[in-house]
Amino acid sequence: MTRVRAISLFSLLMISAGLPPLFAQDGAEFSFIEQSAAFIAVARGVVEPSDGLMRLAAQREGLIEAVMVQEGDRVTKGQELARLNDTAAQVQLTIAQTELDQSLLQQHLSRLRADAAQAEADRLAPLRAADAMPGRQIDEAVRNAEIAAIELEVTGQNVVLAQQKLSEQRAALDAHIVRAPADGIILRRTARPGDGTSTSTVTEMFLLAPEGPLVLKAQLDEQFVGLVQVGQSAEILRERDDGSRLTGTVNRVAPVFGSLASAQPGQVAGGDAARTVEISILLEGPSDQLARLVLGQRLIARIAP
């Protein structure tokens, strides 16, 4: 096959996939197109975190009292990002702590009573055999010991319930804090002090890009569906090639065409999205090149058999 014919065939392949011909910095078509026979499909996509972007919202409704981060800040897992007004939650926590303290005091008092009642019953027990005291009085001492033991058990259960309530109130208080669920970078901050949050309609406060491997989320034209499988390797290049190359491995092929998954019952997916399948390619290569990638950057993948 001549060089001109190889270039033409690959250009047709690019156009049929909805991709424009690739050009070098001087405007000429790339010479590597001659090697197009080494690839079975081509797809264009954007760079994303492998776990996707995280849209963070508050767990409680309320007014935002403070915001601790800005767009572009790098955050660590568990770091406080924002805090809602928690005055009411603080009051409920104080009440729960007081109730626990009271339950503990009542348990201590019940234990003293139970110990005293049991000691009295033990002291009188030998007198029954000697017939030195009326049996009715001894039986009463035994019943008092049994009643005191039951009261001690009830106060112990009250302590457990009070401890659970205190734990719930601590969790409720902590829910007024929005924390980073993972290490990453804040891409967008919509939270502002004084704004309200809602849980009925989720109010996004932050958009977080979690740290970790990057992937290329690409749209595969229907003519290549069935040719691309998980585990196949790919060569990754920029839309305007600068000569650098990354590699990748296909780690997901969607089992459904474009908009079919989001179509309403009774509707038929249509448009360009209905003719493509989303694939994910795990990006690999020199760390310095991977570090230069920008989320949302458009790249082109050529997939090998």
Image: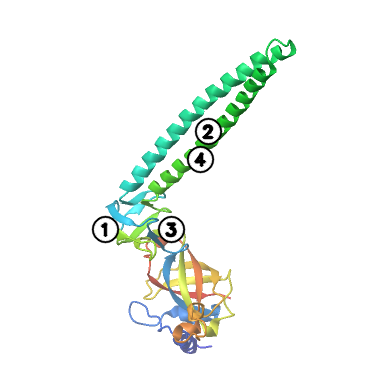
Counting the numbered discs, the total is: 4
Q: Are marks 4 and 1 in contact (CB under 8 Å)?
A: no
Q: Nearer the viewer, residue 54 or 38?
A: 54
Mark whose residue sits in front, 3 or 4:
4
Q: CA distance from mark 3 to mark 2?
A: 62 Å
Disc marking residue 155: 2
Percent coordinates x, y for residue 152 in the rendering: 56, 30
Q: In the rendered view, does 263 fall on the left or right side of 131?
A: left
Q: CA distance from mark 4 to mark 1?
A: 38 Å
The answer to whether residue 253 is above or below residue 222 is above
Residue pointed to by mark 1: 192
Label 4 vs 2, first from the N-terminus: 2
For numbered disc 2, what is the local secondary structure?
Answer: helix
Tag 3: amino acid: Ser
Disc marking residue 161: 4
Label 3 vs 2, first from the N-terminus: 2
Tag 2: amino acid: Thr
Quadrant (top left, top right, bottom left, bottom right) of the C terminus:
bottom right
Q: CA distance from mark 4 to mark 2?
A: 10 Å
Mark whose residue sits in front, 4 or 1:
4
Q: Nearer the viewer, residue 191 or 168?
A: 168
Tag 1: amino acid: Arg
Q: Nearer the viewer, residue 301 or 84?
A: 84
Q: Residue at x 37, y 70 (%)?
A: 297
